[in-house]
Amino acid sequence: MRSRRTTLAVPGSSPRFIEKAQGLPADEIFLDLEDAVAPSAKEGARATVVAALNEGDWTGRTRVVRVNDLDTHWAYRDVIEVVEGAGANLDAVMLPKVSDASHVQWLDRLLTQIERATGLPAGRIGIEAQIEDARGMVNVDAIAASSPRLEALVLGPGDLMASINMKTLVVGEQPPGYTEGDAYHYILMRILMAARAHDLQAIDGPYFNVRDVEAFTRVAERSAALGFDGKWVLHPSQIEAGNAVFSPSQDDYDHAELILDAYEHSLGEGRGAARLGDEMIDEASRKMALVVAAKGRAAGMARTKRFDPPGN
């Protein structure tokens, strides 16, 4: 899986913002043709995005374009012009307002047709599906199973909050009057379960108060604790905090790698369980350690501790 600890939204109509984004340490950059671009600028933004993908330096970052939603007259031309113009330099297409599996299937078929027509490897370009309304939430399992291209489910909190009439004007914050628990817990867990059932990543949506990094961190820690893989960032000030929240600590990463080493050593000696210090480990321990180790490796972390087999 690609690392998506932080997914930076960049207006596709702004060469200045696009250039600045190339020097920022977000794992994924998505050039936006939807909400961040005024209707009068949408068609021109396609050429700006194509040039940025072909000419920019996106080394080490996942390159994504968010097209307009399927109910608009811009969507099909967004996909055709961007993929025909820069498909070789594009990792995934983000489709917003996905409320039915057929939306993703439409995009899958269109991508396949373009790839075959232009000589691109069929199936290489991935899809991210944004869940943004009540219908999408109800259909999220079918959406998650809709295409082998699908790589991630993404929460779109603003539109979703409006869709269910949630009583708040601050995207990402608890609605006034909701004093027991977390109003987003069901939403987050529903998306997470659908994603994990189909080996997809789960990405939390943005927090709109971009200057309040402490609040952003608090909200990000909520979804990270549940198991989400990353979160949108809307401002460079949120990137460092997001990368930290969705990476394991150095101690946890080292411990996970040690568990994997100890268990592999134990299997080599014909035993299905092992000890690591005072800790008993088994197959369940290995599976839990794999999750943490994979996140650390994706984040580029380096081990600081080595396994010393018993008796050495």
Image: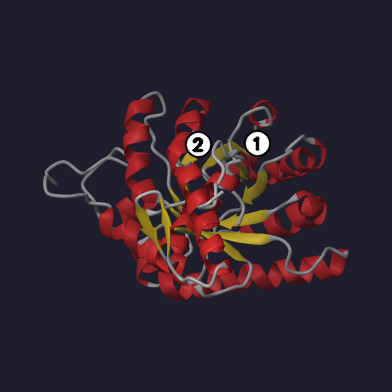
Q: Is 243 displayed left or right of 207 in the figure?
A: right
Q: Whole-Å distance between the Cαs marked 2 and 1?
A: 26 Å
User: Residue placed at 36% from the left, 65% from the top?
Assistant: 137
In this image, 168 relative to 240: left or right? left
Name which residue type carries label 2: Asn
Report crowding for label 1: few under 14, some 14 to 19, many 20 or more residues within 10 A (C-alpha).
many
Residue 203 rendering spot, x and y as whole percentages: 47, 52
- Where does the image place residue 26, in percent across and percent down from the top left? 58, 36
Q: Quadrant of residue 51?
A: top right
Judging by the rendered image, the residue that carries numbered circle 1 is 13
Residue at (67, 27) in percent of width and height: 23
Q: Which mark is residue 243?
A: 2
Q: Given the current orientation, which residue lies at the most extreme right position?
A: 119
Give the mark count: 2
In which image quadrant can residue 305 be found?
top right
Which element is circle 1 on?
A: loop
In this view of the protein, which residue sits in the foreground, 137 or 164? 137
**What residue type is disc 1 on?**
Ser
